[in-house]
Image (cartoon, rainbow, N blue to C red):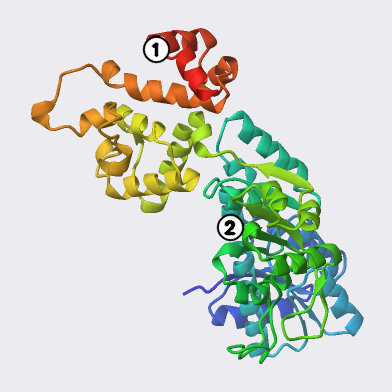
Amino acid sequence: MTKASILIVDDDPIVAESLSELLTESGYSVTTALGGDEALETLSSLESPPDAILTDVLMPGTDGLSLLRQVRERKIGSPVIMLTGYGTVESAVEALRLGAADYLTKPVVEHELELAIERAIQQRALIQENAVLRRQLDDRFGLDSLVGRDSRMQRVYELVSAVAPSKTTVLMSGESGTGKSLIAHAIHVKSDRKDKPYVELACGSIPETLLESELFGHVRGSFTGAHTDKIGKFQAAHGGTLFLDEINSASPGMQLKLLRVLQERRFEPVGSNETIEVDVRVILASNEPLDALVAEGKFRQDLYYRINVVQIDLPPLRERVSDIPLLAKHFLDRFGREMGKELVGFTDEALSAIAGYSYPGNVRELQNVIERAAVLTTRPTIDVDALPPGMLGSDDDVGIAGAITERVEDWEPMSLAEALREPERRILIRALEANGWNRSKTAEQLEINRTTLYKKMKLYGIGESEERCAG
């Protein structure tokens, strides 16, 4: 059974043949090239790059170091192991600096050579796996994955693109479930820190007594239960990004410690006198308006001004009515792929119920609703029977969802257009309220022209009475 493909490069035919026989007996698929020039021709002709390249250093024409440079410049991707009979520290250092996977001297010891090849191939596999995972993360958390046509969300995306390349501290505000974590990760992915750690901490979920240890770490014996040293989130995020959610829940004492580390970029772990310096880009979020907490004396004014450099406000989903169908389809496609199901969309009744719901849990709740539907449905198209009962209306709010849940004997025959009237009316009112009854903005958000909006408002009796109530 072939283990892997190896390209052997040596200008001495005897050495090349000897290495070829050795590795072939060990199960490798071997190709030989007599010198660097022939190796480059061979690499160009192969359908896929070899799993590893084994090359001599001193060769006429294209020598080993030049071949190594060419492999890197052409992004061939094969790890290169250098062999030489005249090994020096300088040449070894230069080879490793240029990206060689290993450096061995002749005569080669068989088991050392095989170990070097195995290490190089494993390293290549890890690099490829990491690249795949990073692409998946970029797809899931990058700006391109963010869904929404609402004008306020478009402004959010513009701010993410503008602020990502800098080190500027970002403060996000918005109700729970509006996607603050996703935006924070998108900022990290679009920054030059994307290959460094991204660390999250929900401050509100950590008891006050443990929050300092979570942020700054501790040394063994610093408090009861501290049996070993622990690295905190700031140190773990060194070189990358730290996202602190629910910063409004931090105590005044913790706020003061955060102010210091944000200003000085250094701190001491709990129980330690050692000062640790860090390079961290900090993004913070609050599910309460921090300016109001400052006015009430519940949040330090100096910390607020320190973190409020660039502010991103995320609107609740109920104010993004036109985005609900887009998000629902986005989540349905994702869960369909993850579950291996063919899920193509929603029935009109289901989509009307989904679009007409108020979502107190915001985007997170919508995601859970669609995941539940994807799990429960036995059909490619999601119908109302896969939706949570709470989304299907109430006695005081009867539209299509309420009509569908009536008993068969109570059913009053109606057309689909008649059944959809009430859900559409509710959607129009919510959109108008969200846009301050600005008809032009509402029509743009709902992707209809103003004439159509006026006709529907007249048809459904939406007019000055609702507008006065809203005011």
The residue shown at (81%, 74%) is: 96
The residue shown at (58%, 88%) is: 225
What residue does disc 1 label? 461
The image shows residue 210 at horizontal and vertical percentages of: 61, 76
In the image, residue 354 above or below residue 18: above
Indicate left or right for 367 with 297 as reference: left
The residue shown at (53%, 74%) is: 3
Q: Residue 466: in sight, yes or no?
A: yes
The residue shown at (66%, 74%) is: 120
Residue farthest front in this picture: 296
Q: Amino acid at mark 2?
A: Val
The image shows residue 244 at horizontal and vertical percentages of: 66, 60
Between 222 and 21, the one nearer to me in the picture: 222
At mark 2, the secondary structure is helix
At mark 1, the secondary structure is loop
Quick one: label 1 or label 2, which is nearer the N terminus? 2
Q: Amino acid at mark 1?
A: Gly
Residue 379 falls in which quadrant of the image? top left
Q: Residues within 10 Å of mark 2 (few under 14, many from 20)?
A: few
Number of numbered discs visible in the structure rendering: 2
Q: Measure how far apart labels 1 and 2 are at the Cα level.
A: 54 Å
Indicate left or right for 462 with 120 as reference: left
Indicate left or right for 386 with 365 as reference: left
The image shows residue 79 at horizontal and vertical percentages of: 69, 69
What residue does disc 2 label? 132
